[in-house]
Amino acid sequence: MADKIKDTKIIFVVGGPGSGKGTQCEKVVAKYGYTHLSSGDLLRAEVASGSERGKTLQAIMQKGELVPLDTVLDMIKDAMIAKVDVSKGFLIDGYPREVKQGEEFEKKIGAPCLLLYIDAKGETMVKRLMKRGETSGRADDNEETIKKRLDLYYKATEPVIAFYSSRGIVRKIDSELPVDEVFGHVAKAIDGLK
Ligand SMILES: Nc1ncnc2c1ncn2[C@H]1C[C@H](O)[C@@H](COP(=O)(O)OP(=O)(O)O)O1
Ligand SMILES: [Mg+2]
């Protein structure tokens, strides 16, 4: 795993809930053929499977809390292993949620070459999530859980950005702009990779 991963780009996509991570990742997949792994989507798939593990996860996610570190990391790692032979790069969307998750990822998988920091204002994220909640069917897209997710984002995830900034791999993307303009900046950051 470690050997194969060495030649594959790993990009962390970090931002608050509703900032537009998933939207931008889809566009990166279309243009660059990277593999998009959303930690939230992986977890929701586990919930949908109806497994015992899924039931435990659902209760945690419904409260807007973080699921245990090892669970998410194992799921991401399995998904990466499944794709490593055919993948030009990996977009790790919504992970790390806290500095410790980043450290564990690097120990078990590898180092990111870029962190895309998808940045939107708190009020913008709430607005987008409330709108998404009308159709997403996501148990956590409701006002009460959104508030908890935002609080946790500011407390746990913003330190992740500071942590990787010191390494010089963070590109801050203004996600208040229209989707295509945001993507213009995302593409520039990816094109800048060696
Ligand atoms: N730049 C942008 N302008 C307007 N709406 C946007 C946007 N980026 C995303 N959205 C919309 C699409 C979704 O309904 C909602 C949340 O986007 P998302 O990609 O699902 O966010 P995330 O994956 O970060 O939670 O906001
Ligand atoms: Mg998402």
Image: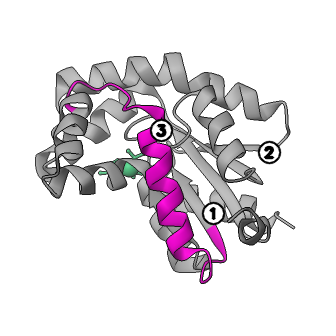
Residue 48 is marked as none
Residue type for callout 2: Ile
Residue extent of the magenta highlight: 62-89
- Tell me, yes or no, whether the highlighted magenta stretch contains residue 78: yes
Determine which quarter of the picture holds residue 106.
top right
Q: Which residue is drawn at 82% across and 63% down?
A: 192
Determine which quarter of the picture holds residue 182.
bottom right
Determine which quarter of the picture holds residue 152.
top left
Circle 2 residue: 169
- Dots 3, 2 in contact, CB < 8 A: no
Query: Of helix, strand and loop, which one carries label 2?
Result: loop
x and y, in percent, of residue 93 in the image:
50, 51
Circle 3 residue: 70
Of the image marks 3 and 1, the number of the one nearer the N terminus: 3
Of the image marks 1 and 2, the number of the one nearer the N terminus: 2
Q: Which residue is drawn at 58% across and 73% down?
A: 34
